[in-house]
Amino acid sequence: RHSGVRLWVAPQPVLTEADVQQAELAFTPAGEPAVVLTLNEKGRATLADITRPYLGQPLAFVVDGELRLAPIIEEPVLDGRVALTGFDTLQEAEELVRDWSR
């Protein structure tokens, strides 16, 4: 999926899979797949710091060098739990859960 929007991605990750305490598959009230990430203490503080100043901006999720998702930050994520939505298929969400659960 490509929206045609250019997205700058930092050369070094701000968060890594080491910051992910748990990744789980969930569903929105509309029945669409979602991935819920729970971050460890360090990841929680980092995500809060990067989501506060960038409201309305995309946040790139890169896995194994591939941009997998770039949701718009709608509100600061202060509790270390974030639900990612907008997947084309259930399989796409399941793959991310597997990738982040290694």
Image (cartoon, grey):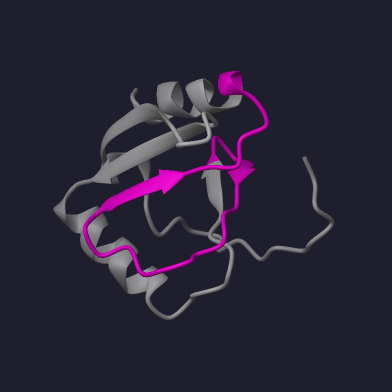
Q: Position of residue 2 (x, y in %)?
A: 80, 46
Report the front residue among 31 and 52: 31
Q: Position of residue 51 (x, y in %)?
A: 40, 69
Q: Position of residue 93 (x, y in %)?
A: 52, 28
In the image as oriented, which residue stretches furthest toward the left? 41
Q: Is residue 78 left or right of residue 50?
A: left
Number of dots carrying numbers: 0
Magenta stretch, overall SS: loop
Identify the residue shown where x is 49% and y is 21%.
94
Does 90 appear in magenta?
yes
Identify the residue shown where x is 49% and y is 75%.
55
Q: Is residue 37 left or right of residue 73?
A: left
Q: Is residue 69 left or right of residue 88?
A: left
Identify the residue shown where x is 36% and y is 69%.
76
Question: In the rendered view, would you say 54 is above or below 16?
Answer: below
Question: In the rendered view, would you say 43 is above or below 94?
Answer: below
Question: In the rendered view, would you say 96 is above or below 38?
Answer: above
Residue 37 quadrant: top left
Q: Position of residue 73 (x, y in %)?
A: 49, 65
The N terminus - image quarter: top right
Question: In the rendered view, would you say 28 is above or below 41?
Answer: above
Q: Which residues are magenta?
A: 63-91
In the image as oriented, which residue stretches furthest toward the bottom? 53
The C terminus - image quarter: top left
In the image as oriented, which residue stretches furthest toward the front? 30
Identify the residue shown where x is 56% and y is 73%.
56
Q: Is residue 64 left or right of residue 38?
A: right
